Image (cartoon, helix red, strand yellow):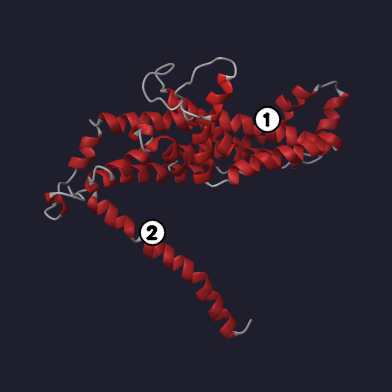
């Protein structure tokens, strides 16, 4: 490679890196600094703000809305990521793998199923949010219109008060929508892992009389267990402070939907920049922990040999 071409390549690679450093990482110190102030967007504190030390962080411990948003984020992440997306993705991945092995109509259906799941995954949050809002809306929503055919009155699916087991109805609706949106990630991970398991192992246990479910319980799941911690953490962290998708569905009317939405509402709707920055800093620290755990939990698959 000529020197001029090498320079052009380096500049080409450095440009997005510099843009990221300038417009993203360079703002982090400012956010941390503002979290120790009482800065506001409007009013006297917009120009006469000052340093307040740890007051914003101390207020978080007694802020019922912040604590409610943390609880909702945790419930949402656990039921969506650790339960819904994880096991549904595993089940769909199993069906896709079986379809590829069998071929014929099963292979065609497996390809169709994987295409549908991936299409939902790559759909932008804005588009998916409006799709689900059109289905869940109390007045004129597709689900309520369908139920009306059976004489069922309109249901407020995005209701934030009451609910079953102390969980608002809106949170259940948001979890169902997010499971639909994000299951393809675990599906791709697990179906890829299943393809790496030698078929000779399954042929051997079939000779011993094992059925299909025993194969999955005693072979597939144990050989894929190295993937479980990493996939679980990825799904949990991806759902914990999901913003755009939930903002369209409920964020504008429910500030406590999750921590990310509450931070945005505090900073840009209630104009409390300092306090909103403190919430964002706490959320950033949580994600640093997630990142550290992801590096620790990434393990290599067991090498299976014929010896």
Say if 151 sits above or below 38 in the image: above
Badge number at residue 193: none
User: What crowding class fits label 2: few (fewer than 14 Cα within 10 Å), some (14-19), or many (20 or more)?
Assistant: few
| Image spot of residue 200 (x, y percent) | 84, 36
| Image spot of residue 124 (x, y percent) | 54, 47
User: What crowding class fits label 1: few (fewer than 14 Cα within 10 Å), some (14-19), or many (20 or more)?
Assistant: some
Judging by the rendered image, the residue that carries numbered circle 2 is 24
Q: Earlier in the sequence, mark 1 or mark 2?
A: 2
Name the quadrant containing residue 156.
Answer: top left
**Can I make out residue 249 in this image?**
yes
> 157 or 184: which is nearer to us?
157
Judging by the rendered image, the residue that carries numbered circle 1 is 91
| Image spot of residue 135 (x, y percent) | 53, 32
**Quadrant of the frame with the C terminus:** top right
Cβ–Cβ under 8 Å for marks 1 and 2: no
Name the quadrant containing residue 96.
Answer: top right
């Amino acid at each position: 490679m000529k020197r001029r071409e090498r320079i052009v390549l380096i500049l080409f690679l450095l440009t997005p890196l510099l843009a990221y450093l300038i417009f993203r990482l360079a703002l982090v110190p400012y956010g941390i600094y503002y979290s120790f102030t009482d800065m506001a967007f409007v009013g006297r504190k917009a120009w006469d703000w000052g340093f307040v030390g740890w007051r914003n962080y101390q207020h978080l411990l007694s802020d019922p809305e912040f604590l409610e948003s943390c609880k909702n984020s945790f419930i949402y992440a656990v039921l969506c990521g650790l339960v819904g997306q994880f096991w549904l993705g595993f089940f769909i991945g199993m069906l896709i793998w079986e379809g590829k092995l069998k071929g014929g109509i099963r292979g065609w259906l497996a390809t169709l199923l994987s295409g549908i799941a991936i299409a939902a995954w790559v759909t932008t949050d804005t588009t998916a949010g409006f799709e689900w809002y059109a289905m869940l809306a109390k007045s004129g929503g597709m689900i309520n219109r369908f139920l009306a055919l059976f004489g069922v009155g309109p249901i407020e699916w995005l209701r934030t008060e009451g609910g079953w087991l102390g969980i608002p109805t809106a949170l259940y609706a948001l979890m169902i929508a997010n499971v639909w949106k994000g299951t393809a990630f675990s599906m791709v991970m697990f179906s890829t892992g299943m393809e790496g398991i030698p078929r000779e192992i399954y042929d051997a246990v079939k000779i011993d009389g094992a059925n299909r479910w025993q194969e999955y319980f005693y072979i597939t799941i144990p050989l894929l267990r190295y993937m479980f911690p990493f996939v679980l953490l990825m799904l949990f962290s991806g759902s914990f402070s999901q913003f755009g998708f939930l903002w369209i569905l409920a964020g504008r009317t429910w500030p406590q939907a999750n921590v990310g939405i509450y931070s945005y509402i505090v900073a840009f709707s209630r104009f409390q920049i300092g306090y909103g920055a403190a919430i964002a800093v706490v959320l950033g620290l949580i994600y640093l922990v997630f990142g550290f755990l992801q590096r620790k939990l990434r393990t290599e698959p067991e090498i299976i040999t014929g010896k």
